[in-house]
């Protein structure tokens, strides 16, 4: 008959306890150092941008169309100059041309550009050709001339300083819209009246205000995109 092997433990219970007592502080130290190292890494610009981008993506999911982040700095700059909420400008842009994604930037009524200005509103109703709905017969050189616009009392703005007030330039268009809305009461808080002046339609007002209120719920988070774009 074979003898039974004597399977004695290689380490005694006391030795095991001693090793655990020795290794436990080391494990805790490694964990703490790893934790703080990770926290420190998260403060690096690349991690902040990734976190910010993720937050932006989650917010944009609340909308039927993303607000193009490259437009947000333009809305904000126009708000700073004219006192019109930048989220209102975004709402107008969404309604007018779906954030400039429409194939044609000219409406059937003759409204032009990113924010769909009637030419007579852009260059001024004192222009000798302006009657009716405001399409007029205004040469392009006059329509985009800041001096002519000032002469005829229009709302077109040369926002980027290139010497032209161009409704097909996104900066000029947004600043011109802000200029018009500010003069219509938006800068003093009469948002609804200002929107109605932009387009005399109750349905239009309702649609713009819907998006304005929706975007306003996230205005601070959305504005963070401005900082992110400036850092790129």
Image (cartoon, helix red, strand yellow):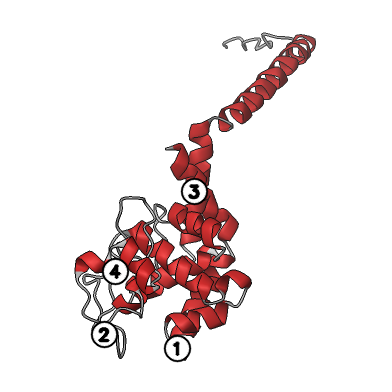
Direction from residue 157 to residue 131 in the image, left or right: left
Q: Position of residue 82 (x, y in %)?
A: 53, 62
Q: Can you identify the residue that label 3 sits on?
A: 226
Q: Can you identify the residue that label 1 sits on?
A: 203
Badge 1 crowding class, 10 Å Cα cut-off, few under 14, some 14 to 19, many 20 or more, is few
Q: Can you identify the residue that label 2 sits on?
A: 109
Q: Is residue 63 visible?
A: no
Q: Nearer the viewer, mark 4 or mark 1?
A: 4
Spatial CA span between label 1 and label 3: 31 Å
Sequence-wise, which precedes: disc 4 or disc 1? 4
Q: What residue sits 43% from the left and 88% below the top?
A: 200
Spatial CA span between label 1 and label 2: 17 Å
Q: Name the quadrant of the C terminus.
A: top left
Q: Can you identify the residue that label 4 sits on?
A: 113
User: In the image shown, does 107 or 155 lie closer to the viewer?
Assistant: 155
User: In the image shown, does 64 or 120 lie closer to the viewer?
Assistant: 120
Q: Position of residue 199 (x, y in %)?
A: 42, 83
Spatial CA span between label 4 and label 3: 24 Å
User: In the image shown, does 7 or 68 lie closer to the viewer?
Assistant: 68
Q: Is residue 157 visible?
A: yes
Rendered position, 127 above or below 48: below
Q: Which secondary structure lies at badge 2?
A: loop
């Amino acid at each position: 008959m074979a003898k039974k092997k004597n399977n004695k433990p290689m380490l005694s219970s006391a030795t095991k306890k001693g090793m655990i007592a020795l290794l436990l502080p080391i494990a805790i130290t490694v964990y703490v150092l790893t934790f703080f190292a990770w926290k420190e890494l998260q403060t690096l610009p690349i991690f902040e941008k990734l976190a910010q981008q993720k937050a932006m993506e989650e917010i944009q999911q609340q909308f039927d169309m993303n607000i193009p982040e490259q437009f947000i700095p333009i809305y904000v700059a126009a708000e700073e100059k004219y006192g019109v909420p930048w989220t209102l400008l975004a709402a107008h842009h969404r309604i007018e041309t779906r954030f400039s994604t429409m194939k044609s930037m000219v409406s059937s009524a003759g409204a032009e550009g990113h924010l769909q200005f009637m030419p007579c509103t852009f260059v001024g109703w004192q222009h000798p050709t302006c009657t009716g709905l405001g399409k007029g017969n205004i040469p392009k050189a006059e329509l985009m001339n800041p001096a002519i616009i000032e002469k005829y009392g229009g709302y077109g703005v040369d926002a980027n300083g290139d010497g032209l007030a161009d409704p097909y330039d996104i900066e000029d268009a947004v600043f011109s819209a802000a200029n018009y809305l500010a003069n219509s009461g938006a800068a003093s808080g009469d948002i609804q009246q200002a929107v109605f002046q932009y387009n005399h339609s109750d349905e239009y007002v309702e649609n713009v205000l819907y998006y304005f209120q929706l975007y306003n719920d996230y205005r601070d988070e959305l504005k963070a995109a401005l900082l992110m774009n400036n850092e790129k």
